[in-house]
Image: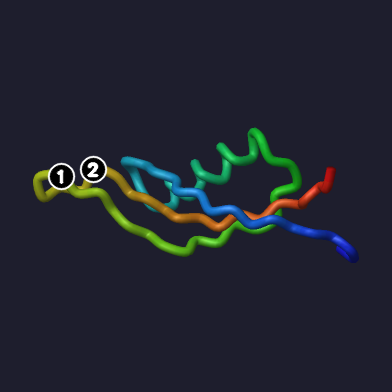
Amino acid sequence: MPDSIYKVIELVGTSTKSWEDAAKHAVETAAKSLDELRIAEISKLDMKIENGKIVAYRARVHLSFKYKGA
């Protein structure tokens, strides 16, 4: 889009199932309060481990949306 400005934020989604589910959760939650989401980029994947077992998958997501000035 010509003359458009987009803001990029970083979110961390979590899931007990998978990295894909963690990223999806981050985007779907952001979509509830942000308009005109544009691109989601996974920048990092990690896992939370307790007692030698994976208890959560985490996806760090950079999400862009159209910036609307005041």
Image coords of residue 2 (percent x, y): 90, 65
Above or below for 6 versus 21:
below
Image x and y of residue 12, in percent: 45, 48
Where in the figure is residue 49, as x and y percent of width and height? 19, 49
Give the SS element for disc 2. Answer: strand
The answer to whether residue 50 is above or below residue 10 is above
Res. 14 mark: none
Classify residue 38 as left or right of residue 47. Answer: right
Q: Looking at the image, which is closer to me, 3 or 49? A: 3
> In the orientation shown, which residue stands out farthest toward the right?
2
- Which residue is most to the front? 70
Q: Write down the quadrant of residue 39 in the picture.
A: bottom right
Q: Which mark is residue 55?
A: 2
Give me the C-alpha separation between circle 1 and circle 2. Answer: 6 Å
Give the residue at the far left of this rendering: 51
- The residue carrying pointer 2 sits among few (fewer than 14), some (14 to 19) or many (20 or more) residues within 10 Å by Cα, namely few
Instruction: Return the residue at label 1.
Output: 50
Could you tell me the amino acid type at mark 2? Val
Amino acid type, label 1: Glu
At 11% across and 50% down in the image, what residue appears?
52
Please report contact status of discs 1 and 2: CB closer than 8 Å, yes or no. Answer: yes
Q: Residue at x 59, y 57 (%)?
A: 40
State the quadrant of the N terminus: bottom right
